[in-house]
Amino acid sequence: MAENGARPIRLGMVGGGTGAFIGYVHRIAARLDGDFQLVAGALSSRPEVAKESGKNLGLAEDRIYTSYEEMARAEAARPDGIEAVAIVTPNHMHVGPAKAFLEAGIHVICDKPLSNTLEDARALASVKPAKGAKFLLTHNYTGYPLMRQARELVKSGALGTIRVVQAEYPQDWLAEEAGEDNKQAAWRTDPARSGAGGAIGDIGTHAYNLARFVTGLKTEAVSADLTAFVPGRRVDDNVHIMLRFEGGARGMLWASQVAVGNENGLQLRVYGDKGGIEWRQDNPNQMWFTEFGKPKQLLTRGGAISGSAASAMNVRIPSGHPEGYLEAFATLYSQFAAVIRGEGADYEALLPTMADGVEGMQFIAASIKSSEADSKWVKLSDV
Amino acid sequence: MAENGARPIRLGMVGGGTGAFIGYVHRIAARLDGDFQLVAGALSSRPEVAKESGKNLGLAEDRIYTSYEEMARAEAARPDGIEAVAIVTPNHMHVGPAKAFLEAGIHVICDKPLSNTLEDARALASVKPAKGAKFLLTHNYTGYPLMRQARELVKSGALGTIRVVQAEYPQDWLAEEAGEDNKQAAWRTDPARSGAGGAIGDIGTHAYNLARFVTGLKTEAVSADLTAFVPGRRVDDNVHIMLRFEGGARGMLWASQVAVGNENGLQLRVYGDKGGIEWRQDNPNQMWFTEFGKPKQLLTRGGAISGSAASAMNVRIPSGHPEGYLEAFATLYSQFAAVIRGEGADYEALLPTMADGVEGMQFIAASIKSSEADSKWVKLSDV
Amino acid sequence: MAENGARPIRLGMVGGGTGAFIGYVHRIAARLDGDFQLVAGALSSRPEVAKESGKNLGLAEDRIYTSYEEMARAEAARPDGIEAVAIVTPNHMHVGPAKAFLEAGIHVICDKPLSNTLEDARALASVKPAKGAKFLLTHNYTGYPLMRQARELVKSGALGTIRVVQAEYPQDWLAEEAGEDNKQAAWRTDPARSGAGGAIGDIGTHAYNLARFVTGLKTEAVSADLTAFVPGRRVDDNVHIMLRFEGGARGMLWASQVAVGNENGLQLRVYGDKGGIEWRQDNPNQMWFTEFGKPKQLLTRGGAISGSAASAMNVRIPSGHPEGYLEAFATLYSQFAAVIRGEGADYEALLPTMADGVEGMQFIAASIKSSEADSKWVKLSDV
Amino acid sequence: MAENGARPIRLGMVGGGTGAFIGYVHRIAARLDGDFQLVAGALSSRPEVAKESGKNLGLAEDRIYTSYEEMARAEAARPDGIEAVAIVTPNHMHVGPAKAFLEAGIHVICDKPLSNTLEDARALASVKPAKGAKFLLTHNYTGYPLMRQARELVKSGALGTIRVVQAEYPQDWLAEEAGEDNKQAAWRTDPARSGAGGAIGDIGTHAYNLARFVTGLKTEAVSADLTAFVPGRRVDDNVHIMLRFEGGARGMLWASQVAVGNENGLQLRVYGDKGGIEWRQDNPNQMWFTEFGKPKQLLTRGGAISGSAASAMNVRIPSGHPEGYLEAFATLYSQFAAVIRGEGADYEALLPTMADGVEGMQFIAASIKSSEADSKWVKLSDV
């Protein structure tokens, strides 16, 4: 990766001040392969936090901003200005910065979901980026090497025609009411900041996106039953969805923040008429692959049958040495860096795009609409 | 179990001739604890098979029957006649024999589902058994010690108020078209013999019954999407169902006969506001139990925290020595023997009943109705 | 199995009175396939326990004995006398009854280890059985279908030349001092009743026998370090042994009764120059099989690649429905029944013999000798 | 970690040119938390590789060296010279550079094992570092959060008095002869470059060090049986060792490079009289913890019961999001950075030292001596 003599890309960040979870993850992801160098930030909407955070991250004083608009303007004007920006604010604060930087000709790396409303997402998608600025949506689970191998297996026909897709993402951290002092919980359960969806936006979209990434199936319609179990909660914390895909495949998606005993139980199972795969994020270095009538095989990251040259590129260390969440995240960053440098042709089809972001919002909107209509099937094309 | 000096109960069998799977299982279950002795049978509708099979099982010649009606009549008349009968025919042949033996005052052990139509099930339920004849439906998975412990955990309040129930039963043995020479596959995919449901009747009812057994929740309504994936198949081979329970709990049930890589992946997960449990049949001697905010605990059959005296009675050998499917099945038989002998007060609440059988048929009927109505929610009380 | 029209074999039992663990297991094993009928017993050395136990098991009064010598004499004289006897007493009480019944021409099924001293074992081996009476040693773990498949895989050359054998059997039930009221613990930790070995005799021999059964390797020498960790314990409760096999393979064996967190963690791993297998008793229906350079495969009992006709005979129910400890035990009984009836040629090579029993005692004696000599290598041929 | 405003430490590297595995790992570890910046290197003994590699890593031309002696001299003389150096050469090339940089007052991060002979290790240990230069040995597995929690559990007395330690590290990548073109295999199987030990030095020391790190037990003696299975191999590829610890605990260590089906199966199991722990590197985010008489608990990295403040510092992201090998490695780097900055008092006891390195060499030497003396017990203090 960034050990090929290329100069690190100058990176800025919006959001991600002290105490933020996902901003910290993005910074590690940006550093891990050496492809980026953080040089500017509008790290918080609270000026003192922005300043303190910027200082801690070693930013020059004149590149610690308190408004993203100002940052976009100023950095675009500098000869050594940032080439890319990571947007790691709560959902409702994605679209504004994304638009500003794209229009300033700065590449955008944006956390998911794309926005908190479908309208906003579509508005963003219609923005014309200046100077060919590119966009990456960090659906980070698609960066796991075995999920990429799964996608290749599907494409290769090893599973045959896909029939059934079971996706789930159970957690339990919101099983009880969380106080406003729990910063992560607070904004995720506030419709104003997270959007109308709770679990569906926070984790349901991850499971959905991963299922789409691996299978390549197009979704026709959803039938959803969204529930808020914790008393007083204003957004869903449990999501049951049936899925119909074009061509006849069927699926189920379960996401929950109240499934006691689950930390981040993201799981994907895909079955075709010739084979099946099963994968869980809590041990992402292993994936089951079964050809009908033969014993189950345990594929390992980088192990025997490790897929094409393209998937091999995603592997840093030999099989048997576990990689995890941060490496998968870093792979998106590094491959986006390659794309920015014009060396990423092989990766471009693998990286989550603006269109994926809009579809994620369609998925959320259609699911909410279905749930409100007593689980009537709602077409994604109808929202 | 039958090591308490009690005389073994004289047992007959309807169905289960040579080559039958479930009849063989019932016989092992009947023998394992020594509580039953097989002495009569109408083992096949084909006389020569009935005779050959009876001979192989060591039945006296005059107790090998070729019609169950005759068997019921003759055995009821003998002073040493059978006290109980096991009905192990295909689904459409359950109700006739069950009625005949109950009316003859002979206890009935009947394989599931109860019948192939809800009407038949209700008709059977209205039969007045002679001489207090009792009825057992062999939803064998309820015989697993840890499923009984799960039920106790729920009852004890250890899980709090149940919120989410995830039940599934994936298999793959019908992933391709099966010829008529595959006897097991043939009748299960023939609506005339299995009923209108395919996977839903064969395995979906097992998952459903187990969820009901463990949680005690009453089902309000189902929203189902049933599919036949294998070309030409006349019954469903994949079942996606959303569940609503009285009191607000929500659930999902997935049953499939085309999920390549799954042999008998029955799995139950139950989450309440205080705790959760997770169990898989392929390693039935272990169950996860999590109290919110604490580490997951691995409960083992007969191990530490093994539940009440009642659940202890289900354990034959010390923890760490795996028991399996046959032992769970045998537990139903042995405890039914105790009930027959008037010593089974503790067990009676645990054994699946005629009412469970009728409800299973309601579940099937409601699911099919919902699926035909584009997954509209259908109340169980409306079928 | 016993569903082929054959008359059940008349069985007696020595030991196994009320409260005994292994006698109860033997009775289930004898019943499960219907090949035996228990008709006589000397179930305890305490007359009142013998009588009470016999009554509970439904034995005729005149066939409840209080001495095994009397039982051997009387049963041999009856026209309907027992054809086989199960010896399920503590270790020091195996040889006496075994000799008596073999000399009375009655087939013997004997629990392991064969005796409590190597001398006794050799004496027993030199007995000339009357009327061709046969002998079965119940090293029950060899009855697991996947262990038989493992043996076939080794024989077939699928693993190549065996290099490394790792066998272990950790438990924790004796991690603390057990009172004399714990009947199972009491005799197992008393050298007078269990022999000089503790864990090595009780569970180490099982692991050893299984390794020998699967690999077919002949043991050259052992280097052992035996320890008694619990204060006051007079026999070993932890066993570390290095193994050298003829031909150059190497192995390790660990058995422990103080490994907190282990119930019956019997595990066998065998590695050759072409492949490897790994199996654990706590989920005996699965076995890993890896061909060098290919992904690990999960073989299942009765699943794809389920071995030869011979191993298929060991499977009662389809793959995915777990069988366990009792079924493996019952398989030894049923196949010994076939041998007794003269129909068991295919099984004879699979069933543990008197010679296995003597070798097990050599293994114990050599290990104790090595441990006493500061872990010096001791040849099995030198004890 | 490096997000506290601290300036990154200037780092050099010896070894680790293009194609090297462990050098690449060290660089990722150095970058991941932002605590180091690579600015100089003697990356290969072949000048053209050194230059090409340095260029690819973005080093200034005048800081690409072709000899470590020159690099030590030149960098020590520069005002902006490196503050620390990572030594990632084959084993026989550790001591020379380590001595040079320590004597130049530059902190040393050295890959394990410390050297290829015990004599060399002792010589290095006697070096007087200039200007308080510190030393870190990268026994990276000690950086796994759960291994640190295990160490705390032992210290806290939760396991009671330790009785049994089972450590193992099976691999299979050297199951067949590897050609000289396999760079990793070539030097590891060449006694001149790897030292007299093969598997024992490459992976056995890791397992040994981890056992020592977690238990704190002091080793008394070893009884070893080292084998070279692959024809023509000049160093061991399979290692069986029995361990005796001061105070009476016993252990076993198995390391193998020929165990087909194992990628990097490092496993540690520790049992005391009150509790036990079990951990495997292939899923390092989980650890079993059992208190005697209670169910097994599955501890997770950062999950409930996640240990003291000290161990909490090792966790970057919430439980349920897997971290892996690179994060554990990076933790050693980051905490060494804190030590260098004088802020690492809490970490200093956790980081592997020169003394650990010497002891690792003693372990290797004693094991080889024991194996050559037919597995006689050899005290570590006697080599």
Image (cartoon, coloured by chain):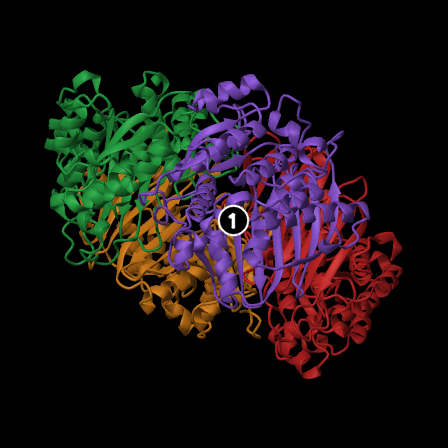
Chain colours: A green, B orange, C red, D purple
Residue at 23 percent across and 39 percent down: it is B371
- Determine the chain carrying the residue at label 1: D
Left or right: residue D217 versus residue C273 is left
Dot 1 alpha-carbon crowd within 10 angstroms: few under 14, some 14 to 19, many 20 or more = many
Q: Is residue A271 shown to the viewer in this render?
A: yes
Residue at 88 percent across and 55 percent down: it is C382
Most foreground residue, A226 or D305? D305
Quarter of the image where the N terminus of chain D is located = top left
Residue D31, position in %: x, y?
41, 35
In this rendering, is residue C118 above or below D178? below
In this rendering, is residue B271 above or below C154? below
Residue B173, position in %: x, y?
45, 37
Residue at 59 percent across and 41 percent down: it is D112
Left or right: residue B134 versus residue B6 is left
In this rendering, is residue C179 above or below D374? below
Q: Which amino acid lies under the numbered mark 1 shown in the image of this protein?
A: Thr
Most foreground residue, D30 or B37? D30
Residue A341, position in %: x, y?
32, 18
How many numbered tags mark residues here? 1
Left or right: residue C159 versus residue A26 is right
Most foreground residue, D127 or A118? D127
Q: Is residue C138 shown to the viewer in this render?
A: no
Q: Which residue is mark 1?
A: D142
Residue A315, position in %: x, y?
45, 29
The single residue placed furthest to the bottom in the displayed view is C48
Left or right: residue C219 versus residue D284 is right
